[in-house]
Amino acid sequence: MKKLFSIIALLMALVLFVTGCNSTSAPDDSTDDKVTDTKPTDKPTEAPTDKPTEAPTDKPTEEPSETLKPSERGENAVYSADFAKYKVVADDASGGEVKTLANNLIDTVNSCWGVTTTLVYDKDTEVSDYEILVGDTDRPESKEFKESLEDGECGYRVIGKKIVILGSEDQYTETAIVLFANFMLHDKDTSAKQYMTEENTHVVDATNMLSVMSYNVRVDYGNNNISLVSTMIRNYMPDILGVQEADQTWMKLLNERLSKNGYAYVGIGRDSGGKGETSAIFYRTDKLEVLDSVTLWLSETPDIVSKVRGSNCNRIVTMAVFKRISDGKVFVHANTHLDHSNADVRSQQVTFLDQYVKDFANGLEFMVTGDFNFQPDNRVYAQLMDLKYENCAKLAKFARGRDDNTYTGGSMIDFCFRHDTTAFEPYFYTVCDELIDGKTPSDHHPIFLIIELE
C-alpha cells in the first residue's frame, strides 16, 4: 500500500536543541548472575539488584525570544504568550475513543505549556482564535485540513492560531492525537518558549499503523492503584497491550475497566488451574480479531505447569494470531516475562521462547513484548540478537526516551522485539514516564510503539 510521509517538521518549530536521552549501563554478567532472591516467591521484585545511575544531561540554555513583533512571528503562529488562552475543542459526533484521547490530551497540554486547559465540544462552544481542534469539528479549519487528507491519512496542522488534529476517519484521528501528544512530550523541555507556524504539518498514512504497548503493572496492591494504571493505558488506547505481573485480581479489575473501551484479552495464569500472574494480551475488538491463541510454559514441557531449573517462578509466553479487521492482515503477537533469578536461567528461557514463538507463528510475521529482566549490554540480550531479533526502540523513525529506563528503580528491561524476517517498521517509540495524578502508577513505565504493519 502506498505510504505517504509528508513530514516538514516535528511538533515545535525553531527547536534549537532537543535534549538527549539519558543512557544507562547494565550490570555485567558477573553481577547479573547473582541470584537476587534464593527463596521462591509469587511476588518477585522483578528487577536487577544493581541499578545503574543515570548520567547527568545538560539542558539547553538558549530560548527563543518572546518579544518578536507579529510581523516577525508571521501571521499564522501559536506562541507562548497565548498558551493559556487555548481550549481543546472536540467533535461532539466523534466516537468514544476519540473523545477519551481528546480528554487525555488535556494533561499533555497542561504539562508542556504550564497552563490549565479545558476540553469542550464544538456544538456547545463559541468560536475562538485559540483552539486545538480534535476530530472533524464544525470549524472551517477542520474542514480545510480534512479536504487536504487522502483516505487513511492523519496528522496535525497549524491554521491561523489554531492547531488542527485530524484523520480521514475516527480511527485515524486516534493515531493523530497520540502522535501529537507524544511529539509535545518529546520536546517538552524546549517547547515552553517555542511557537508553531503554518509550516508545521505532520501527515502520515495511518492505514498500516498498529499501536502496541507493553506494561508491567506490578502485582502489589499496597503501592499502586488500578485506576492509575488503567488511566495510563487509556491515555494511549493501544491496539494491542501485553501486560506482566497481572494476577487474577488484577486481570478482573483491568478487564472491568478496559472492556468499557472495547478491549478483550487472551491468556491464563502461570500456576496450576490458570491461576497466578499472567502475561495476557489485551486487544481492541473493533480493530482486531483473534484467530488462535495459546499460553506455553518456558521449559522443556511447555504444555504443563513447569519451569526450568533455577527459575524462581513459573514463566510463560502468551501468543495470539491476530487478523486486522480493516484489511485482513494476519500477524502474531507474543508477550512474556522472564525470570529475575540469573542470566543462565533467562538464557534457557530465551531458547524456549524463540522456539515456541517461531513454531506458533509458522511463517507469519511476529513481534515479542515483555519484561525481560535483562538490559541491552547483557549477554542474554546479545543471545536474542544472535537469534536475529531486533529492538524496535532502536529502529523507530521517531522516539521519545529511546534509551530511557523502563524500570523506575533504574534499568531498561522492557522491550518490543521484531525478528529480522518481519516487515514491521517501527514508526514511533516512547517510554511513557509521565505521571498520573502526580504519581507513577507502577514500578515500570510502559513502552508504547506505533508500528507500520505492511
Image (spheres, rainbow, N blue to C red):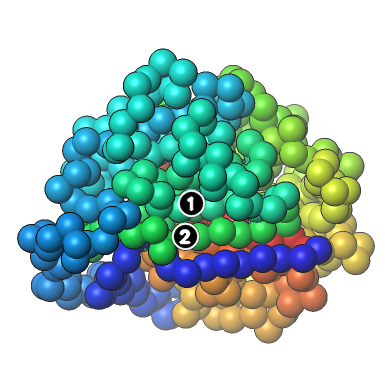
Residue under label 1, please give it: 156
The amino acid on which the numbered mark 2 sits, given as a three-letter code, is Thr
x 45%, y 53%: residue: 157
In this image, 117 relative to 174: left or right?
left
Q: Position of residue 2 (x, y in %)?
A: 77, 65
x 67%, y 30%: residue: 263
Residue found farthest to the bottom:
386
In this image, 391 relative to 41: left or right?
right
The amino acid on which the numbered mark 1 sits, given as a three-letter code, is Tyr
Q: Residues within 10 Å of mark 2 (few under 14, many from 20)?
A: many
Quadrant hosting residue 98: top right
64 in relation to 448, above or below = below
In this image, 297 relative to 255: left or right?
right
Quadrant hosting residue 385: bottom right
Which quarter shows the N terminus?
bottom right
Residue under label 2, please give it: 201
Residue found farthest to the top:
124
Disc 2 and disc 1: Cα gap in Å? 6 Å
Q: Position of residue 50 (x, y in %)?
A: 33, 67
Q: Position of residue 199 (x, y in %)?
A: 41, 64
x 62%, y 47%: residue: 147
Q: Are marks 2 and 1 in contact (CB under 8 Å)?
A: yes
Could you say which is closer to the camera, residue 82 or residue 349? Answer: 82
343 in relation to 153, above or below = below
Residue found farthest to the right:
362
Q: Position of residue 403 (x, y in %)?
A: 41, 70
Element assignment for label 1: strand
